[in-house]
Amino acid sequence: MKSVQLFKDVEVTIKEVATNKSGLHKHHFFELIYVLDGSGVHNINNNHFDFSKGDVFLLTPEDAHTFQIVTPTKFCIVDFTKSFFAKSVHRQEEKMDVSDFFKRLEYIFHNHHNVKGNIIANTDRNLFKVLIYQLIKEKEKNQIFGEIILQNIVFLLLHLIARNIQESMTTFSKKQNPKSKIHEITAYIQEHIYDKELIKIENLATWFNKSPDYLNRYFKSETGNTIKDYITRYKLNLIQTRLKFSDLTISEIADEMNFTDESHLNKIFKSVFGQTAKQFKREHTMS
């Protein structure tokens, strides 16, 4: 399997494909794919999805994919490395601080595989198309402040994706079990995971108008886990994302996630994953 590396923060490419010439490959960076024209089948991690004009796919690092072309196809491909989400960047055109943005988009990183195939609903397709074409135009002009404008367009695209993923999962959850409130509870926890006061069991109970004991028993009966266990595991998943895709130190991550210190984080991390955060970072950090 081919593995592709990228050495720029953001690369916008127009790619025309007439035959099935691209083999299965994976990337060490994020890739947004917009179908400008054509049709075929997109194979992502051995899952097959039909695609046509206007469809959108998001690949995260280590996803393996290839295309089977049915009619000649033109893609707009946006590749962006982890440095795109860096805490600080020093350049002539200073980019915005994206650390808070990274937090908001973690929903994508942890849930996009739960949405199958094209990830943009019909209601947002026209807006997404306008932004993609503006992105292409901005990249071709290469004018002053172009990088900042390009970055902001990509931010808008990713926020649209995040919204569509959240709405898709909410709709699916309601269809599966209309009476269940679990998705509302987990979505609230994920949204407020950095505020230790809001996700205390007594405050969660107040928000959902239940007693703490009832809410915890209900959550465990539906998921098999206590709310405390769910919060800890979700935090650890976020920490894994931080270790792989951000430039934060382990000490900074511990502070951000409301652990006592780096040692406390490492103790919990190792008890779940069998290795320290430092070992995990060394094994998984992208080049």
Image: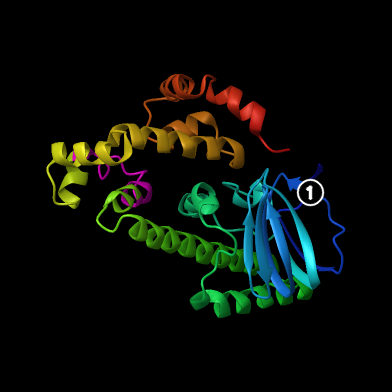
Q: Looking at the image, can residue 5 be seen?
A: yes
Q: Looking at the image, can residue 145 be seen?
A: no
- Which residue range is magenta in the image? 187-201
Tell me: 36 left or right of 18. left
Give the residue at mark 1.
24
Tell me: 28 left or right of 3. left
Q: Quadrant of the N terminus?
A: top right
Q: Quadrant of the C terminus?
A: top right
Tell me: 191 left or right of 277. left
Is residue 192 covered in magenta?
Answer: yes
Is residue 65 covered in magenta?
Answer: no
Q: Is residue 142 above or below residue 3?
A: below
Kindly identify the residue that appears in the image at 44 percent across and 31 percent down: 254
The amino acid beneath tag 1 is Leu
Kindly identify the residue that appears in the image at 68 percent across and 43 percent down: 62
Q: Nearer the viewer, residue 256 or 208?
A: 208
